[in-house]
Image (cartoon, rainbow, N blue to C red):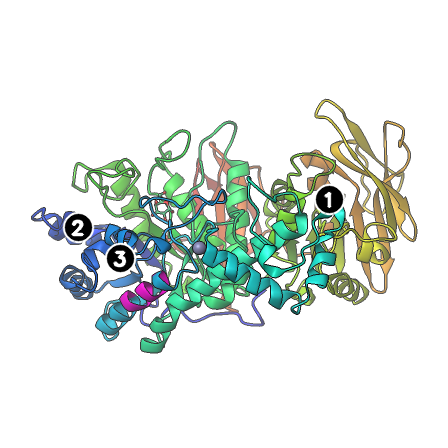
Amino acid sequence: MTDGRTRFPPINPRCPHLLHGGDYNPEQWLDSPGVIDEDFRMMKLAGANCMTVGVFSWVSLEPREGEFTFSWLDDIMDRLAKAGMFAVLATPSGARPAWMSQKYPEVLRVREDRLRNLHGLRHNHCFTSPVYREKCRIINTKLAERYKDHPALLLWHVSNECSGQCHCELCQQAFRTWLRQRYGDSLDAMNKAWWTAFWSRTFTSWDQIESPSSRGERALPGLNLDWRRFVVHQTVDFLGAEIAPLKAITPGVPVTTNLMGAHPCMDYWKFAPALDVISNDNYPAWHGRGDNLPVAAQVGFVHDLMRSLKGGRPFMLMETTPSIVNWQEVAKLKRPGMHRLASLQAVAHGGDTVLYFQWRKGRGGSEQFHGAVVDHVGHEHTRVFRDVVEVGETLSKLDDLVGTTTPVEAAILMDWENRWALDDSECVQKKKGYFETCLEHHRAFWSMGIATDVIDQDADFTKYRLLVAPMLFMVRKGVGERIEQFVAAGGTFVATYMTGQVDDSTLCFLGGFPGPLRKVLGIWAEETDGLYDFDANSIVPQPSNALGLDKTYQAGEICDLIHAEAATVVATYGGDFYAGRPVVTVNTLGKGQGWYIAARSEYAFLADFYARLAQQLGLHRVLEADLPEGVSAHLRTDGQREFVFLLNFAAADRTVRLGTARYRDVLTGRPVKGRLVLGRYGSAVLERKA
Ligand code: GLA
Ligand code: ZN
């Protein structure tokens, strides 16, 4: 959903094009004559219009404390401007000079076992340390003052992939302060929320509280969850401290930081308000076992999340590799066509950029064999370079896409706090598979060409017609009521096994699961059965059920034993001692419906279930006809025109039925009607009237 808009302005109105470029580290080549000239020559050939500079460059900018060396960066910024290109200018805090760690050990991160790290690697800093924050403030101020009027400056890229935790004494203090605020300065309230009478854990003074540790407390779910919340809070606070001088000096320059998809450690909904534009790093493992479809669907999920984080505003693909990823199990080359396909996939889901890590391969360092646009051979006559040129040419024809939006009627709810609570909870199965379950539900829509947002439970549900919330184990305050209102007003809500068991503090709901969702779902979940992987049950649809389901499906792993209270039974279990008891139910509340899927199932069930539900609700699909297996379809619009992306992730030709609409192929200009054949990893962008 797009907050009522059909088009957003470009990321920075100074560049009304899709951005193409990548991480550029010229500081590694300053003493190699000719390399930088060659870079700029080849950037033109590649159709690059921007470069991300300054990531991890601290020691090249401040080799000794208080001594600044900007001349090399001045030169790069000037060259970019001269070439008509732009800079995504990074603050360097993702890695820092050794002099700083040596002089101020407090900047170094402390592990959960309370051992302070040595200097080294990157992302090895304390987010609380006043010294580190001050050093960041100084360098960021210098950068902003120096380049505030520079014609190349397009965007600030703050730090890099903020992640990890620090357990130092400064962080412990900050955690205690945060807890006092959360619990209104009441130890009693905190003790109750954490259920500390269990195992004699009641805290009688704030300074007794410590972050979770393998050497100490690690089995207090309320503490674990609050610590994770605090880590996110502190990280965002640190980002805010980095952003403050940039905003003060360059209020008109947008700010981003590169996120890491649906990374388990951070709650990106808390990052979004601090950023002007969302950007993401994306390193899918293409060409693995089987086909590319699960990978493609997962990437689609992440792109949808990125688009959703700021209410439908186009996001940036900040990093992806033009060829291989050197840190994965296997560094498999992208097969011909895949680079263009994966690049267009980002645009199809609402991305306005395709940027790489990185422009040129380094000679040394642990990433010397990571894919890059320019290889060690040093010229443009490589397969990868040609792939990049092709993407550059493609993007240059898609100016009309900039800022366009994706109309969405359905949302998948994937909530980080819920994920942490589930992962931490000792029940039913060691591995809960929450994220994977969200992916499977999303994939059912992805394969039908129905756009979905990916939201959390604090989102505004009223924008949608269908809300799918797999395994919503934790239901935060007020959310049950909001879902009830959503359904009463005509919305359709789908929940599954393991729903409505704990509150914000991980305390179980009393009086029957699914707690605050019991009324909307019209069921009581009495018990939950964890099955071994060699166990199986089945889902048997009732004769003439509401969705017309008529096949039997496999179920397993997690099975809720439920009672249909107000709900109607749509399918029952086929086996075990609970054979005949409800496994799929639907409840009517006001003008809407609440569905419950009580067991984990094979994917075929979800595909059929959502196909029929979507049909019943009349959800819009990009194309009316079913898509061939392996093809995904996406739509962006400016209100007048619709841009339809057809992406073939199958390793064979696919024929797509276009229906009766008349199309124009945006890339070739040719009219298209009726059918379109997409080759292996083929992709097309078509335009039709809205
Ligand atoms: C991350 C980092 C980059 C680089 C790439 C390599 O995304 O941000 O600096 O290390 O991974 O894949
Ligand atoms: Zn710390």
Q: Nearer the viewer, mark 2 or mark 1?
A: 1
Q: Nearer the viewer, mark 3 or mark 1?
A: 1
On the image, the x and y values in percent for residue 119 come to 31, 46
List the residue tagged with mark 2.
Answer: 39
Relative side of 271 to 482, left or right: left
The three-letter code of the residue at mark 3 reads Gly
List the residue tagged with mark 1.
Answer: 199
Q: Residue furthest left?
A: 33
Relative side of 408 to 54, left or right: right
Point out the tag, 3 or 2, that comes first from the N-terminus: 2
Residue 38 in magenta stretch: no
Q: Is mark 1 within 8 Å of ligand 2?
A: no
Look at the image and tell me in which quarter the C terminus lies.
Answer: bottom right
Q: Residue at x 42, y 71 (%)?
A: 9
CA neighbours of label 2 inside 10 A, class few (<14), some (14 to 19), many (20+): some
Q: Looking at the image, can residue 641 be seen?
A: no
| Closer-to-camera residue (620/330) | 330
| Closer-to-camera residue (481/468) | 481
Point out the tag, 3 or 1, that comes first from the N-terminus: 3
List the residue tagged with mark 3.
Answer: 54
Q: CA distance from mark 3 to mark 1?
A: 50 Å
| Closer-to-camera residue (371/636) | 371
Q: Is mark 2 within 8 Å of ligand 1?
A: no
The three-letter code of the residue at mark 1 reads Trp
Q: Residue furthest top?
A: 534
The three-letter code of the residue at mark 2 reads Asp
Q: Residue at x 81, y 51 (%)?
A: 514
